Amino acid sequence: MSLQLEIVTPHGKVYDEEIDSVVMPTTSGEVGIMPGHIPLLTEIQAGEIAVSKSGTVDHLAVSKGFAQCIGDKVSILAENAISESDIDESEVEAAMARAQEALKNAKEMSAEELAQLETTIQYANIQQLLKKKK
């Protein structure tokens, strides 16, 4: 038995493959999904997704979003997601520098702008951590 995993962002499909299992970061902690899992709808937080397939484990960085598990299909809708192999360290460092520069003007930002900035920083941190693990 296997699962179909689909990860989608506003920019398009990031992942769409048959897998053995997936572990994802939710607001309640890490959740592992295997074939036959009960139906689930949960909020995803910024973190690392580990995908097991044919004896190997692929890692992806993900920002906040939602995950749905129905039958043997897992769908993750996230603001951003990227495979470890596609992470560009210089791009991540530049994004982090821009975010830290923006933090200097935090007093002038709305709560929504601050929340978006926090999400950007968390996502960049996850990408950096994934690259350092390698």
Image (cartoon, helix red, strand yellow):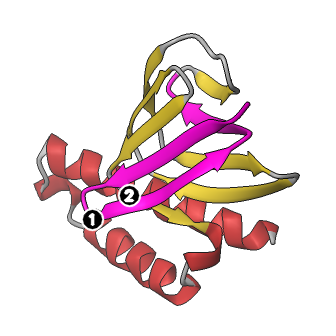
Q: Residue 132 location, x and y as percent? A: 75, 71
Q: Residue 3 location, x and y as percent? A: 62, 35
Indicate the secondary structure of the residue bearing disc 1: loop
**8 or 97: nearer the eye?**
8
State how far apart marks 2 and 1 are (Cα): 8 Å
Q: Residues within 10 Å of mark 1 (few under 14, many from 20)?
A: few
Q: Is residue 48 found left or right of 114 in the rendered image? A: right
Query: What's the residue at 67%, 38% (across, down)?
Result: 22
Tell me the kind of residue under disc 2: Asn
Query: What's the residue at 68%, 45% (across, down)?
Result: 19
Q: Which marked residue is nearer to the observer: mark 2 or mark 1?
A: 1
Q: Is residue 114 found left or right of 22 in the rendered image? A: left
Query: Does 131 appear above or below 58?
Result: below
Query: Does 69 appear above or below 56?
Result: above
Q: Quarter-wise, where is residue 25 in the image?
A: top right
**70 or 59: nearer the eye?**
70
Q: Which residue is mark 1?
A: 11
Q: Is residue 90 found left or right of 130 in the rendered image? A: left
Q: Main secondary structure of the magenta part?
A: strand
The label on residue 68 is: none
**62 or 128: nearer the eye?**
62
Does the magenta segment cover residue 103? no
Q: Quadrant of the C terminus?
A: bottom right
Q: Residues within 10 Å of mark 2 (few under 14, many from 20)?
A: many
Range drawn in magenta: 1-27
Q: Which residue is mark 2?
A: 80
Query: What's the residue at 57%, 66% (across, down)?
Result: 83
